Image (cartoon, rainbow, N blue to C red):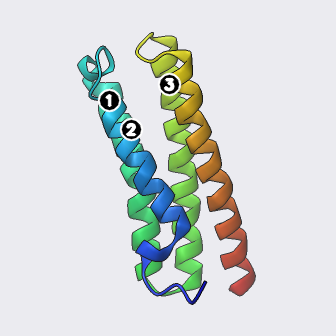
Amino acid sequence: MGKIERFEDLIAWQKARELTKEIYQISRLEPLNKDMGLKTQMQRAAVSIMANLAEGFERGKRTEFHQFICIAKSSCAELRSHLYVALDAGYINLDQFDFMAGKTEELSRILGGLRSAVARQR
């Protein structure tokens, strides 16, 4: 693959976009859609992953990009924690949880790799 010139070219951002779409879809389902607090927190955490990757990339400095990747990775963990709450509250079933938690774990690994790569370039 060639040089990454736009944040949209980042695999991590693409995966975060997919995850965000899935979070919005699952949060429309009952009974999760009735818990506005948790639903909103889940959506915000997912959007935060995408937004921090985009913002950090566009700042143009590796040091800042590294910092924003760290924030995105933290938001990914926050989202996974919210999924446990949704499971424990009976808002999602175990299959939904496993699928979504697996997506967050995959993205977290990708973000960790990106963070390491950017750190080596600083």
x%, y% of residue 68? 51, 67
| Disc 3/disc 1 C-alpha distance (Å) | 11 Å
x%, y% of residue 86? 45, 20
Residue at 30% over, 26% down: 37
Q: Residues within 10 Å of mark 1 (few under 14, many from 20)?
A: many
* Three-letter code, disc 3: Gln
* Three-letter code, disc 2: Ile
Determine whether, in the image, residue 1 is placed left or right of residue 100. Answer: right
Sequence-wise, which precedes: disc 3 or disc 2? 2
Labelled pair 1, 2 in contact (Cβ < 8 Å): yes
Task: Name the residue beneath numbered marker 1.
Answer: 27
Q: Quadrant of the N terminus?
A: bottom right
Labelled pair 3, 1 in contact (Cβ < 8 Å): no
x%, y% of residue 50? 41, 59
Determine whether, in the image, residue 13 is placed left or right of residue 29. Answer: right
Task: Name the residue beneath numbered marker 2.
Answer: 23
Residue 11: image quadrant is: bottom right
Q: Residue furthest top?
A: 90
Q: Residue furthest front?
A: 1
The residue nearer to you, when weighing 24 against 63, is 24
Task: Name the residue beneath numbered marker 3.
Answer: 96
Sequence-wise, which precedes: disc 3 or disc 1? 1
Determine whether, in the image, residue 50 is placed left or right of residue 10. Answer: left
